[in-house]
Image: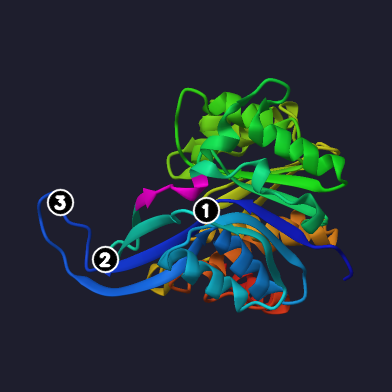
């Protein structure tokens, strides 16, 4: 498959994972069993995509700090020969996250220092180095300079997405599960220039005001209403809402709704949930890049996310594309 690849732009994060026995109450103690370092933010997506397809050109636009965290992030991503880091700026202090990963509950608690993510904006993007088919910006609501107002486009993120489109790129966004008074404005401005919007149930409520959940399960009717709202806000191609049990997608051109169940994964199989949402997004974008239809992309994304749970981070357990399809067939047969 010949193509110009995918660009990931935005928040590059140096992650430190402390694997703890259990998460304690405030003022109480727990034991750290192990500590490991990973590259997070768009580093998750980049590493996932490089595992899925070691031949696809992957371009990166981000800031990595002049510190140990920045060095680690660059070293980890440099291990993939198809990843182009020539548009990564080294300056200042790295964005970092301390992750407390409870071995008891399998849940994670995040303590973040945004640093370079606050600074990232279009001045750090060298468009001449990012000739690609799909441009993905991550994460809205966590990139302070990109979330800032812009007189012409509403927000600076919207300007970036507009400019990517002007250069012939399809655009994609992801957001963080963070509520603030400007959230709807930030997301709606960006969606005017977005082709693919793939978000979870919490982010959907932030963006649209619609609670798509019925208890622990997604309500397909309410999800469809929210997806149509995401399309009316500007999303041109695919809008997808994913949660732990199911995803619902909307083809904005045809109006067709797709619902795909998650794969059966036993609780005792799960080594970590970090990066599972990123893995879902990566699976969707990869199939979009290949020209697949929405239903195929959602099946592949469900398998990518499911497989990611079997590793200690969002990419360690991932396989090349055919291996993911084999995993999907095997687990669907068990359902």
Q: Is residue 32 above or below residue 8?
A: below
Left or right, 278 with respect to 2, comes to left
Q: Is residue 277 above or below residue 35?
A: above
Q: Residue 158, position in %: x, y?
A: 69, 33
The span from disc 2 to disc 3 (Cα, nearest Å) is: 14 Å
The quadrant holding residue 207 is top right
| Residue 227 visible (yes or no) | no
Disc 2 to disc 3: CB gap under 8 Å: no
Disc 1 to disc 2: CB gap under 8 Å: no
Q: Earlier in the sequence, mark 2 or mark 3?
A: 3
Is 119 in the magenta?
no
The quadrant holding residue 332 is bottom right
Nearer-the-camera pick, 223 or 48? 48
Where the N terminus falls, by quadrant?
bottom right
Q: Residue 23, position in %: x, y?
A: 22, 58
Say which mark, if any, is on residue 25: 3
Image point (35%, 66%), residue name: 17
Disc 3 to disc 1: CB gap under 8 Å: no
> What residue would you read off at disc 1?
245
Please identify, in this view, whether the residue under mark 3 or under mark 1 is nearer the observer: 3
Q: Earlier in the sequence, mark 3 or mark 1?
A: 3
The span from disc 1 to disc 2 (Cα, nearest Å) is: 21 Å
Say which mark, if any, is on residue 218: none
> What residue would you read off at disc 2?
104
Secondary structure category for the residue under label 2:
loop
Report the span colored magenta.
111-117
């Amino acid at each position: 498959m010949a193509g110009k690849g995918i660009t990931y732009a935005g928040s590059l994060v140096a992650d430190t994972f402390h694997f703890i026995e259990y998460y304690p109450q405030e003022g109480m103690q727990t034991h750290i069993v192990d500590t490991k370092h990973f590259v997070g933010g768009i580093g998750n997506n980049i590493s996932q995509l490089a595992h899925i397809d070691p031949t696809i050109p992957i371009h990166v636009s981000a800031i990595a700090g002049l510190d140990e965290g920045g060095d680690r992030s660059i070293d980890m991503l440099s291990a993939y020969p198809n990843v182009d880091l020539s548009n990564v700026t080294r300056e200042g202090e790295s964005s970092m996250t301390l992750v407390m990963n409870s071995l008891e509950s399998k849940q994670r608690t995040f303590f973040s220092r945004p640093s370079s993510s606050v600074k990232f904006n279009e001045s750090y993007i060298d468009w001449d180095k990012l000739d690609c088919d799909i441009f993905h910006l991550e994460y809205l609501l966590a990139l302070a300079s990109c979330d800032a107002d812009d007189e012409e486009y509403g927000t600076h993120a919207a300007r970036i997405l507009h400019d990517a489109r002007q250069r012939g790129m399809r655009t994609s966004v992801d957001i963080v599960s963070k509520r603030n008074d400007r959230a709807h404005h930030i997301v709606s401005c960006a969606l005017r220039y977005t082709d693919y919007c793939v978000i979870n149930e919490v982010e959907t409520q932030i963006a649209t005001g619609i609670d798509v959940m019925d208890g622990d399960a997604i309500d397909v009717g309410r999800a469809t209403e929210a997806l149509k709202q995401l399309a009316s806000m500007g999303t041109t191609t695919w809008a997808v809402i994913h949660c732990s049990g199911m995803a619902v997608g909307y083809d904005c051109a045809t109006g067709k709704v797709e619902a795909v169940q998650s794969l059966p994964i036993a609780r005792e199989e799960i080594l970590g949930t970090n990066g599972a949402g990123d893995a879902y997004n990566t699976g969707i974008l990869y199939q979009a890049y290949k020209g697949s239809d929405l239903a195929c992309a959602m099946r592949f994304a469900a398998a990518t996310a499911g497989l990611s749970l079997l590793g200690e981070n969002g990419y360690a357990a991932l396989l090349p594309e055919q291996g993911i399809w084999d995993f999907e067939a095997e687990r669907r047969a068990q359902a």
